[in-house]
Image (cartoon, rainbow, N blue to C red):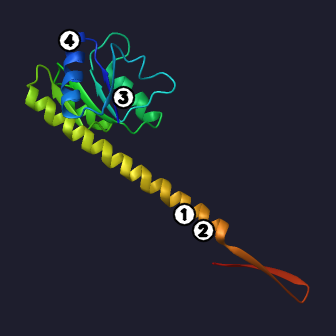
Amino acid sequence: MKLVICEDEKPIRDYIGRCAAEVDTDLKIEKYPDASAVLGPGFDADILFLDIQMPGIDGMKAARILRIAGHKCVIVFVTAIEERVFEAFDVGAAQYIVKPFEKEKLIRTIRKAIELAKENRAVSTLLCDDQADETTDSINRRTITIKSGGVSKIGRAHV
């Protein structure tokens, strides 16, 4: 599972990374000082911790762009401003935590984000399996052609 931290303040970026590694040692953690890396081609993450106030593109705009592009990652906003909490709902954020935050709050938030990311993966797997079943079903169907009075009728038999 991959967790990306997009935060312009290095001490906070590193702190979130350390706490995430404490929660799950198998997490792959990447850190970026601005939103340009998460908006680039090939961006892929299960969880994204995203600051709102950053140089260049702010985190809220970056989240909107990611959602428009179809990214389903779990987004957690980490910010010093409370006023934009309602905007977070518009981009389907899982959590919105305000700096400075206590370690226990951050740990709970990371755990919740991991659980949500696991649920997202499970749903994606189910959807992929359903699509594979539909493809397999169509491959396993046999057609029978019956001629009657010069007219051909095609029917499908399920095997």
Q: Badge 3 local density, few (<14 within 10 Å), some, or many (20+)?
A: many
Q: Secondary structure at mark 4?
A: helix
Which of the image's four quarters has the C terminus? bottom right
Residue at screen point 20% across, 38% down = 111
Q: Quadrant of residue 115?
A: top left
Considering every residue shown, the one lying at the far right of the view is: 150
**Whole-number angstrom distance, CA of label 4 to CA of label 1:** 48 Å
On the picture, is 81 further left or further right than 58?
Answer: left
Q: Can you identify the residue that label 3 sits on?
A: 63
Q: Amino acid at mark 3?
A: Ala
Kindly indicate whether the residue at mark 4 contacts the one at mark 2 (C-beta within 8 angstroms): no
Return the x and y of residue 154 as percentages of the image width and height: 77, 78
Q: Secondary structure at mark 3?
A: helix
Tell which circle, 3 or 4, labels the residue nearer the N-terminal end. Answer: 4
Kindly indicate whether the residue at mark 2 contacts the one at mark 3 (C-beta within 8 angstroms): no
Of discs 3 and 1, which sits in the foreground?
1
Q: Can you identify the residue that label 2 sits on?
A: 137
Q: Can you identify the residue that label 1 sits on?
A: 133
**Whole-number angstrom distance, CA of label 2 to CA of label 4:** 54 Å
Of discs 3 and 2, which sits in the foreground?
2
Q: Which mark is residue 11?
A: 4
Q: Quadrant of residue 20?
A: top left
Q: Secondary structure at mark 2?
A: helix
